Image (spheres, coloured by chain):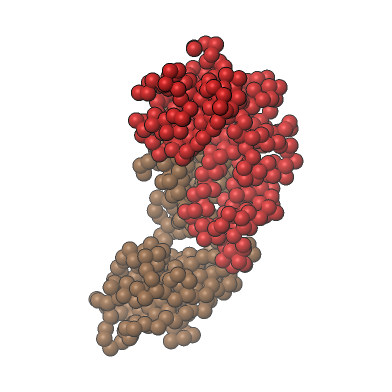
Chain colours: A brown, B red
Amino acid sequence: MSKLSWIAVDWGTTQLRAWAMDSEDQVIANTSSDRGMGRLTPPEFESALLELVEPWLEASTPALVVACGMVGARQGWHEAPYADVKDAFDPQITWVDTTDQRLHVCILPGVRQLVPADVMRGEETQITGVLALEPKFNGMLCLPGTHTKWAEVKEGTLRGFKTYMTGEIFGLLSSASVLSHSVNGSAMDQTAFIESVLTVAKHPESLAGSLFSIRSMDLLHGASPAVARARLSGSLIGAELASVTSNTALESETLIIGTDQLAKLYAAGLRALDKPARMLNADDCTLAGLKRAKAGLTLDVL
Amino acid sequence: MSKLSWIAVDWGTTQLRAWAMDSEDQVIANTSSDRGMGRLTPPEFESALLELVEPWLEASTPALVVACGMVGARQGWHEAPYADVKDAFDPQITWVDTTDQRLHVCILPGVRQLVPADVMRGEETQITGVLALEPKFNGMLCLPGTHTKWAEVKEGTLRGFKTYMTGEIFGLLSSASVLSHSVNGSAMDQTAFIESVLTVAKHPESLAGSLFSIRSMDLLHGASPAVARARLSGSLIGAELASVTSNTALESETLIIGTDQLAKLYAAGLRALDKPARMLNADDCTLAGLKRAKAGLTLDVL
């Protein structure tokens, strides 16, 4: 293995991931665990990190660790106060005291937008990464997840962003509502998904009435779980796209940060609405963002 | 106490209620318990009923029991197959065998609508009751609840209905989503409620983007729980009213079946949209519907 120069960390609510980086910012190893912020109390963070990265450490040289995500929330390891939108790509970092002297840990802040009020933690690093990978990009970024973020990027700056709870609402309705009896399984009917996206994106007033009908269609006409699940997902994503397209025409290509099943649904929904969309690998964006943050540190702080 | 003639029963998912009726259809006693359909297996229904009504029974004369609601669902005491919409006010009843010979129990069916697919169990009896109380009413009925029903009544017939999951979605989002941290308590700011209803009813495309902002407003600007709760409730009811008013102009008065807090929110929302609305006591409607069903039985079956 090449010599360790620093460690990049993405520490979200459910997952902790780390990359060992050499002095050329190349990945020499990577690892992960399910010890996300949501499962840890503040004193447990250091050992959760050590558990993963200790094999990379040398006794003589402290390793710089650059971490982004919910690790910096109030309920995280150490609160990293939000940066304002205008400082999103040049943020103040927060240093964390560690017991183990081989670790030299800093946390990147989240970003807050005062009007309209909104916050993010972790996605700002992916957005930084997109601009590192595609410095000339102007347009909308879509970062799908439990809380999907839409961010507008123009001339190398973050202009604003908006959060949608679509993923969390889908999770609750599919697991804990009366619809759970109808949408079981993981299969998704693509045709029914696109139909539902188009219906609700074009007629957002139809959303509220479309949800219970998923159950009724099953009770009276025996709709398949794959169709029911597709109608629920499509209706909710359609409502999100109605909101997004009411604020921006999405004339240029939308970049979707993610290549998983959820990112593919957003891509399919956008294309059905004749909106061009392209997917970028989310890990690539995260890592590019952490590299750029680390480069800033080298100049200013180290 | 006057002599018992029959027993009216409203047996929903969470509650069981019974009224002792004399031969003039006057209430001579009433009682209730929390042994709703959702907490019982089929063999437990008879004892749950006896627990409440046994003091009213006489050894010599079997008492007629007329029951409506989820008691007739597949998971209830005995399935009472759905009536079609056209037969909603003249339904086939289902007799239930009992061990105790003092009980002579029948269950009213729910109603199904094939296109657009929809179902109800219990509300059809309240709708029957509204027509017994106000036989000349033409227009929309709103029956607020976990699953709110909107029904169109014209010339003494049920023309169609639609179910909205608004109450269930509010329950899930306020107790189990990230919004639960912001909407705690039961207070509701009336001004914020009306503002949210109007915004989403007039601009239904704004719904998806309005939900996470309830959390962000709290995080960044310290919104009060009463305002946050009002915005969540108002946005969801506004989305429902957007759907309802896209299908019907609501030019004549809407009758709201219920006088509780939820019914008052619907009334306030409708009035803010310049739609006339009047509340009817839900128990009065249920009882009027059960009386009318019992009167039909006397002629046809007994």
Residue B225 vertical position relative to residue A297 in the rendered view, above or below: above
Q: Does residue A270 sit above or below B5 in this rendering?
A: below
| Residue at position x 59%, y 38% in the image | B144
Instruction: Name the spot of residue B154 as percent of width and height, x first.
Output: 67, 22
Residue at 34%, 30% (x, y): give it: B43
Q: Work out whether residue A208 can be spotted.
A: yes
Task: Please state the horizontal and vertical placement of residue B233, each as a whole percent of the image.
Answer: 60, 49
Give the residue at x 62% y 67%: B221
- Residue A177, image quadrant: top left
Q: Is residue A14 left or right of residue B156?
A: left
Q: Nearer the viewer, residue A82 or B220?
A: B220
- Vertical comparison of B93 with A23: above or below: above
- B64 or B73, nearer to the observer: B64
Q: Position of residue A285 (x, y in %)?
A: 43, 65
Residue A173 percent coordinates (x, y)? 46, 45
Q: Is residue B189 above or below residue B140?
A: below
Relative to residue A268, is residue A138 drawn left or right?
right
Identified at 59% across, 33% down, the residue is B283
Residue B86 appears in the rendering: no
Residue in front for this viewpoint, A301 or B220: B220
Outermost residue toward the bottom in this view: A60
Q: Residue furthest front?
A: B1
Q: Which of the two residues, A119 or B88, is positioned nearer the viewer here?
A: B88
| Count of number-bearing discs | 0
Q: Quadrant of the N terminus of chain B?
A: top right
